[in-house]
Image (tube, rainbow, N blue to C red):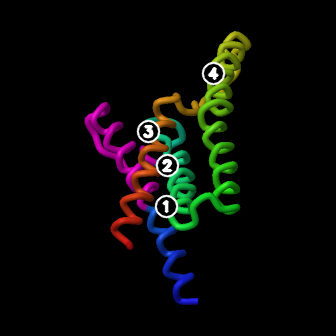
Amino acid sequence: MAIQGFFGLYYIIAVLSAWLFSILLKSALVAFKEKRFSLKKGFLNGGMPSSHSAVVSSLTASVFMLQGFSDLFFVSLVFSLIIVSDAFGVRRNVGLQGDSLNAVLKGLKKSPVKVVYGHTFFQVFAGIVIGVLAAVITYYTWF
C-alpha cells in the first residue's frame, strides 16, 4: 500500500508541476506585454501556454512512464486528446463566434457578451511540451 501511495504522489507532483509552471509562464508572458505582473492573469482562459494541455499531457506521460502502453495509458490518452481538441478547436471557434455575436448585438444596441478565445495550435503544443517535460523531469528526479 505504501508503494501505491508513492507512485500516486509521483502523478500528483508531475501534474502540479506542469500546472504551476504553465500558470507562472502565462503570467510572466502577460507581464512582459503589459509591463505589470499579475498572477491572476495566469488563471485566465486562453493565452500562452495552454495549462489544460499541460496538465492532461503530464498525466498521460506520467502514466506512460510508470505503466507503458497499458489500459490506463490509453484511457488517459483518449481523454487528453479530447481536452486538447476542445482547447484548440471548439473553444477557439466559440470565441470567434462570440465576436460575430457582439457585432450583431452592437447593431441592436445591446450589451456585448464576454468573449473568451480558446488556444492557437502553438499555445496547445507549448502546453503539451511543458506537460511531457514536467512528467519526464519529475520521473527522473523521483526515481
User: Distance between the Cα atoms at labels 4 and 3?
Assistant: 22 Å
Residue bounds of the magenta highlight: 17-42
Q: Which amino acid is tagged 3? A: Ala
> Which numbered tag is attached to residue 96?
4
Q: Residue 12: say if magenta.
A: no
Q: Which of 41 and 71 is in front in this view?
A: 71
Q: Which of marks 4 and 3 is in front?
A: 3
The residue under the point 45% across, 68% down is 13
Q: How many marks?
A: 4
Q: Is mark 3 on a helix, strand or loop?
A: helix
Label 1, on which residue? 15
> Which numbered tag is attached to residue 118?
none
Q: Are marks 4 and 3 in contact (CB under 8 Å)?
A: no
Q: Nearer the viewer, mark 1 or mark 4?
A: 1
User: Distance between the Cα atoms at labels 2 and 1?
Assistant: 8 Å
Q: Residue 32: say if magenta.
A: yes
User: Distance between the Cα atoms at labels 1 and 4?
Assistant: 30 Å
Counting residues from the start of the chain, the first of labels 1 and 3 encountered is: 1
**Residue 80 higher or lower than 4, as above or below:** above
Q: Which amino acid is tagged 1? A: Val
> Which numbered tag is attached to residue 126?
3
Counting residues from the start of the chain, the first of labels 3 and 2 encountered is: 2
User: Distance between the Cα atoms at labels 4 and 2?
Assistant: 23 Å
The residue under the point 53% across, 89% down is 2
- The location of residue 99, given as percent across then percent down, is 63, 19
Label 2, on which residue? 54
- Magenta stretch mostly in which secondary structure? helix
At label 4, counting other C-alpha atoms closer than 10 Å, the crowd grade (few under 14, some 14-19, many 20 or more) is some
